[in-house]
Image (spheres, rainbow, N blue to C red):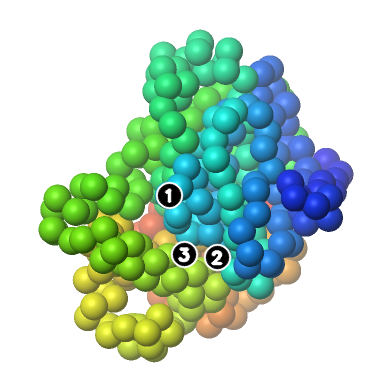
Amino acid sequence: MSDWYDYPDADNDRIQARWRRLGRPDGMLFYEVRCANVESRWRAARSTGIFTVCLARSGGYLRRLNGRERFADPTSALLTGPAEDLVVSHPLTCGDIYTAIEIDDAVLAERSDGERWLTGAGWDGRVSDRLDLAHRALITECLRGIDSFALTERLHQLLDGLLATGASGGATDRPDDELSRAVGRRPATLAAHQRLVNRTREVITGGGYALGLTELARQVNCSPHHLSRVFHRVTGQSLTTYRTQIRTRAVLTALAGDDLDTLRALAADHGFADQPHLTRTLRRQLGHSPAQLRELLATAP
């Protein structure tokens, strides 16, 4: 298993995160980062100077990519090129964990869909439940031991999945100009709606998946009806769907850890009615039971 290394943030050389390499096939670097930064002020993100895909796994933070502000959570995917304008803020106290794939432009150019990667501006999208599970399972295989040939193929399959599921365009919040045409809202109203969605994601990701709708709305200072309507308008999905995705991924993070909590405890901690409710949800969302997922994701024997 790879060692963890410290690296400083981009602003002031203070240690804010640790990273470890998962694999280095030709033309790519696959690694994970555990960020402990909990400061809310905006700061420049660490630049790799190369095309980088970041897949969030736990926690969350605000990021502003080329002027477009969104809350990054465990459903998020991000592509940045060598010259993107990216700044981040960490309003949550739990930090965050993400996986990164750095990719040489020569590797992208050789792909049949290379033009879509090389010519598009950086994008901030969403990842499906099944693709998220494939991503987490690949991390486990890397920690258990995987050869470079298999890792290269699996990483290319992961990139295929990101484009196929629309993470680079369709499966993200609707662009402001599209929203404006669709619902006739003024820019100030659209900005207020996006801030409300960002704040809602922050509350749910920070452990608010156990809150009822009324209590969640109270936390973000609006009515339940308004919150539900705005969230669906901006994101294209219901609050219920989003909440289920977030708590499912929180359970996956727990199942991959060394602490073997009982399923009853996992259900209670993540806002499920009971253990059968947790099991039904995981089977519906991911096609596997909790025991199967623990076997798939746990690195400890």
Above or below residue 252? Residue 22 is: above
In the rendered image, residue 97, in percent from the top left (x then y), is placed at 65, 55
Are the residues at dot 3 and dot 2 in contact (C-beta closer than 8 Å)? Answer: yes
**Residue annotated with mark 1:** 68
Are the residues at dot 1 and dot 2 in contact (C-beta closer than 8 Å)? Answer: no
Q: Which of marks 1 and 3 is nearer the N terminus?
A: 1
Amino acid at dot 1: Arg
Q: Determine which of the numbered discs, if any, sits on residue 246 in the image.
A: 3
Q: Is any part of residue 56 visible from this angle?
A: yes
Above or below residue 206? Residue 232 is: above
Q: Is any part of residue 139 visible from this angle?
A: no
Q: Which residue is drawn at 19% across and 54% down?
A: 180
In the rendered image, residue 231, in percent from the top left (x then y), is placed at 29, 67
Q: Distance between the residues labelled 1 and 3?
A: 22 Å
Tell me if mark 2 has few (under 14), some (14-19) or many (20+) residues whose alpha carbon lies within 10 angstroms of its own.
Answer: many
Nearer the observer: mark 1 or 2; the answer is 1
Q: How far apart are marks 3 and 2 (CA)?
A: 6 Å
> What is the secondary structure assignment of the residue under circle 3?
helix
For residue 155, side relative to residue 225 (left or right): right
Tell me if mark 3 has few (under 14), some (14-19) or many (20+) residues whose alpha carbon lies within 10 angstroms of its own.
Answer: many
For residue 132, side relative to residue 36 (left or right): left
Q: Which of 128 and 287 is in front in this view?
A: 128
Q: Residue at x 46, y 81 (%)?
A: 210
